[in-house]
Image: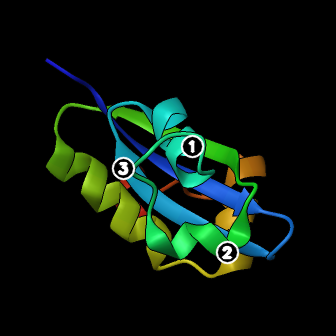
Amino acid sequence: MSHWYAYLLRSDSAARTYVGVSTDPDRRLAQHNGERVGGARSTRAGRPWQLAAIRGPYADRGEAQRAEAAWKRLSHTERLASCSDPSLPAPSDPEIR
């Protein structure tokens, strides 16, 4: 059984973030950066992307998608702050689900 992860990408060149889910965040990063086929269209403009954070593993895709949705409700600044400040709730914490 595969484990699922929610991941946050950061683009310094475009000052943007991108949130997604995957069973292999490193493979997805390569796809988003155009190194492999299959990246999201919305990430073409922000290359190169860096993995800012990975949450998980989650037991199933639905659980990872709930964490992804919680991350997406945060502003750009709040998303980045949640990566570096352990006192802020992470998407996997029940209070922001």
Residue drawn 55% across the image and 53% down it: 32
Residue drawn 29% across the image and 48% down it: 64
Is tag 3's residue or tag 2's residue first in the polypeptide sequence?
Answer: 3
Image position of 8 (left or right of 57): right
In terms of secondary structure, where does tag 1 sit?
A: helix
Image position of 71 (left or right of 12): left
Asked if marks 2 and 1 touch (Cβ < 8 Å), the reply is no
Res 97 visible: no
Locate residue 48, reporting x and y percent: 76, 55
The correct choice, above or below, for 63 with respect to 95 in the image is: above
Numbered mark located on residue 45 in the image:
2
Residue identified by numbered label 1: 29
In terms of secondary structure, where does tag 2 sit?
A: helix
Between the C-alphas of marks 3 and 1, the distance is 11 Å
Three-letter code for the amino acid on which mark 1 is drawn: Leu
Is tag 2's residue or tag 1's residue first in the polypeptide sequence?
Answer: 1
Q: Nearer the viewer, mark 2 or mark 1?
A: 2
Three-letter code for the amino acid on which mark 3 is drawn: Val
Numbered mark located on residue 97 in the image:
none
Residue 43 appears in which quarter of the rendering? bottom right
Locate residue 76, reporting x and y percent: 68, 77
Numbered mark located on residue 21 in the image:
3
